[in-house]
């Protein structure tokens, strides 16, 4: 039975990354009526930042060369370490149970929201591979960062996520779907870019729906 973990990270409820991610999730659920689906909203239900006790769990895993996530709990020896593990365990279980991980995220300050980074910090341990899971990132950004765009080189959102999932978790397959130029809806100086935003949003929604059928 295939399973999808769907993370959402926008501080807005009425959000474009939520819309694009929702298009993927709806199409995926339609294609997999028996599949398992878990939605985690790290903006509405924030994951705490890691603590010193969390770093001790991490150090224990390093010192004991632990690569099997089923053994990570062995690091929880003191009350504060057990408290830290109690935060990690359900998040990690959810992630490990997924075949497909869908991350719906805005671009904030050229990168990802701190809510998403807090989740990532909690679930990331040395040597734990997430291959062969497949990752999809549904994003929204105020500007444009595609090939040839003047701000292309400032896209630390896609670069960070792609490089981190590949470099740390061994995930080869991360696909990005971006809805761009969202700020043209509200910034009068960008009004002339509104048609390009409309086209970008329509394409992102369509791509997300189509893509979901292959996952
Ligand atoms: C805190 C914050 C930081 C932002 N930083 C950027 C940025 O660096 N680049 C950009 O293109 N848009 C930026 N934006 C605009 C958002 O990416 C845009 O509003 C997008 O639609 C947010 O996604 P959402 O609709 O899912 O909330 C920022 C918005 C906020 C609220």
Image: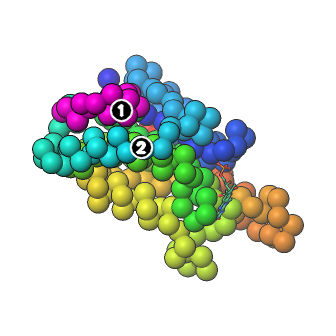
Q: What type of secondary structure mainly makes up the magenta span?
A: helix
Q: Residue at x 26, y 53 (%)?
A: 170
Q: Which mark is residue 80?
A: 1
As rendered, which of 72 and 130 lies closer to the eye? 72
Is the residue at mark 1 in contact range of ligand 1, meaning its CB lies under 8 Å from it? no
60 to 41, vertically: above or below: below
Q: Is residue 77 magenta?
A: yes
Tell me which corner region of the image, top left, top right, bottom left or bottom right, holds residue 88.
top left
What residue does disc 2 label? Answer: 51
Q: Which residues are magenta?
A: 71-90
In the image, taking residue 74 as reference, residue 154 lies left or right, namely right
- The quarter of the rendered structure image containing the N terminus is top left
User: Mark 2: few, some, or many residues within 10 Å (few <14, many ≥20)?
Assistant: few
For mark 2, give the secondary structure.
loop
Where residue 183 appears, x then y in whole percent?
75, 61
Q: Which mark is residue 121?
A: none
Circles 1 and 2 in contact, beta carbons < 8 Å: yes
């Amino acid at each position: 039975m295939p399973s999808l973990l769907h993370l959402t990270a926008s501080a807005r409820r009425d959000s474009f990354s939520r819309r694009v991610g929702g298009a993927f999730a709806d199409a995926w659920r339609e294609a997999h009526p028996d599949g398992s689906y878990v939605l985690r909203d790290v903006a509405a239900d924030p994951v705490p930042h890691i603590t010193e006790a969390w770093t001790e769990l991490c150090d224990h895993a390093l010192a004991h060369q632990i690569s099997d996530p089923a053994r990570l709990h062995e690091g929880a020896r003191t009350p504060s370490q057990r408290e830290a593990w109690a935060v990690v365990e359900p998040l990690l279980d959810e992630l490990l149970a997924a075949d497909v991980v869908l991350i719906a995220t805005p671009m904030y300050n050229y990168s990802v929201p701190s809510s998403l980074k807090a989740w990532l910090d909690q679930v990331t341990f040395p040597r734990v591979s997430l291959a062969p899971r497949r990752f999809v990132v549904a994003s929204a950004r105020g500007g444009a960062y595609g090939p040839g765009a003047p701000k292309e080189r400032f896209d630390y959102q896609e670069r960070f996520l792609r490089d981190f999932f590949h470099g740390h978790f061994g995930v080869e397959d991360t696909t990005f779907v971006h809805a761009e130029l969202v700020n043209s809806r509200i910034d009068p100086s960008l009004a002339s870019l509104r048609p390009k935003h409309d086209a970008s949003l329509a394409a992102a929604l369509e791509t997300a729906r189509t893509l979901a059928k292959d996952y």
